[in-house]
Structures are given as structure tokens and as C-alpha cells.
Amino acid sequence: MAERTGAGASKPVVEEIHFRNEQVYVCLVVNRRHRSARVVDFLAGNFPQKQAAIHQIAVREGIERVYTLVEREESTGWAKVGYAREGSIPGYYKRSDAYMMGHLIHNPPRVNADGALIAPVADVNKAEKALVAAKKLKDLMLPRNVRTQMVTDQDIATLRATAKGKKGLAAFDDRFGRTGTRLHMSARDSKNTKAPEQIISAEVQECFGNAYLQIAQSPASETDARVLVGALNVLVDQLKDREVGSAFAFTTVADTLANAAMLGAGFRKTGLLAQHLVADDKRSDTILWTRKTGAAADAADAA
């Protein structure tokens, strides 16, 4: 039985759809902007039945990609039903890592000669070339003259209203987890008050000690990227103060300046996700970036 969490006849950008029977209980956190859904699994095992239910919902809702985060022992079961192990988030569950398993939806499903579902594959060579380009800019990413301030949900709503159709701020409607506290930060070059501000947001899951970081708009210049590095560093420090030990973010492979900013802010590439995000209405391979804040190590030392 499928149940949905959402209001009104029109479908919201983000919505939870639950499926439950005697053997399967999953929640799909649907993101219609990226035509994707994160699978939250409440019962162990029964992977073929889970994938059959997920596929049915995905086709009905126009979802093109589904993914889930699991601990190591669950990853093998998902791999058997066509999910690729595409990356990891160190410390996602405080003291243990999460593995990101992804699957692309096709109707009918794509299978190999043995009838097994085919797992997605990203363009590794293209990603490596993109990282080389980003690393060449890394040394230019040292932040300077960066002024940051925390902003409220109301401030973000006001910025959206005055953005005149610019799509960047809309991304803060997105969700990664089913719950989470939102933090927003604005940053700008203090020596150039006419330069556009950079805005980032963190969805903090206090119970797990992790935070999903989002960038409102990709940097358009090296100056924007340097400001973004400064904002990321300040926000990560604030997450550490909140005892959040792990931060992660996504950028498309082709976004060289954003990738350089992530490197400049001390993030590491820990995954390559096949067609995870939609950019310019096309599915794009995506880099998973992670950074440990040091909060977990500090807590262990204090104990």
C-alpha cells in the first residue's frame, strides 16, 4: 500500500511517499526538481520486493533516479537488484560510514543477459579531467575579504521573492533527509559591495551528527568561488560547534569553479554518482564531496 505525505492536488517539489506491506516498508523522499528520490528503508532484506515497489512508484511519479544510503552489510543486497555502490560519506552515522547506492529507472527495466538489473555507470574519465581542471584553480581559492552572516528562513523567502525568476534559491526547497534543522549563511566580498552574495544552506541531522550542504548558485567567477570557500569554512566551523562531525555536498562534474571551491574548503571527493542531478534540464554525473569537521574526534578526546 502506498501513502503520500503532501498537500493539495498539485504535486509539491519535495514529497514523501510511503509503501508498506508485510515484507516491505520504504519511504521515498521525492525531489521533482531533479526527478529523483532517496529511498529510506525501514525493514531489512527482501530486496527484490523492495525494488519492485520502488520501480512501480518511480514510473508513476516520473522519477528517473533513486538512491539510498546504507551501512556496509546492506550494500550487497542492493547491489543484487541493480544499485551501484557509488560513494561513501565518512561518519554519516556518527561512528560509522554510509555507502551511497544508486539506480537509474527505465521502463521496462534494463537487464543483462542473465536477467539481472543493470547498475548505473558514471563517466569516470570525464570526471577525472574535471578534477584536474579544478585542482589547477585550487591555489587561487584562498579566501580573503570575506564577510559572512547567518540568515533566517524569512530572509531566504524575501530573497526568493526579489530574485525575479533566478532558479538558484529555489534549491533550498530540496531535502535530503526526512527531518533536519536548516541553517543559512550569506557571504560576500567585503571590498566589493556590488559583487553578488553567495548563499549556502545546511540541513543538519542532529541525531546522526551530519549535515547536507547546498549552494544556492554556482560561482560565476574566481572571486565568487573564493567567497564560497570562506563561507564553507565558517559554516563547517559552526557545525563543529554543534557537534556535527560530517558534512557533505554535491556538485555536477562540469561545474569547475564549484569543484575548485569544494577542494579549496578542504572537502574530498568520495563518490561519483551517475546522472544524480539535473542541470540545464539534462541529467548530469555528480561528485560527492565530504569533510569531517573534527567534532567527533574532539568528543572522543574529551571522553
Image (cartoon, grey):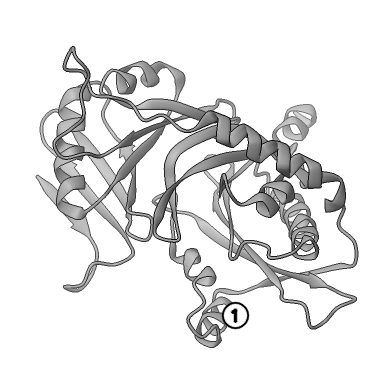
264 or 75, nearer to the observer: 264
Q: How many marks?
A: 1
- Whether residue 215 appears in this view of the structure is yes
Locate the N terminus and report the quarter of the image it occupies: top left
- Mark 1 is surrounded, within 10 Å at the Cα level, by few (under 14), some (14 to 19) or many (20 or more) other residues, namely few
Q: Hey, what amino acid is under mark 1?
A: Asp
Residue 22 in percent (x, y) is at: 10, 31
Q: Quadrant of residue 52?
A: top left
Residue sitting at x 43%, y 44%: 276
Residue 91 in percent (x, y) is at: 60, 31
- Whether residue 93 appears in this view of the structure is no
Specify whether 238 is left or right of 269.
Answer: right
245 or 287, nearer to the observer: 287
Specify whether 43 is left or right of 181.
Answer: left
- Give the residue at mark 1: 155
271 or 252, nearer to the observer: 252
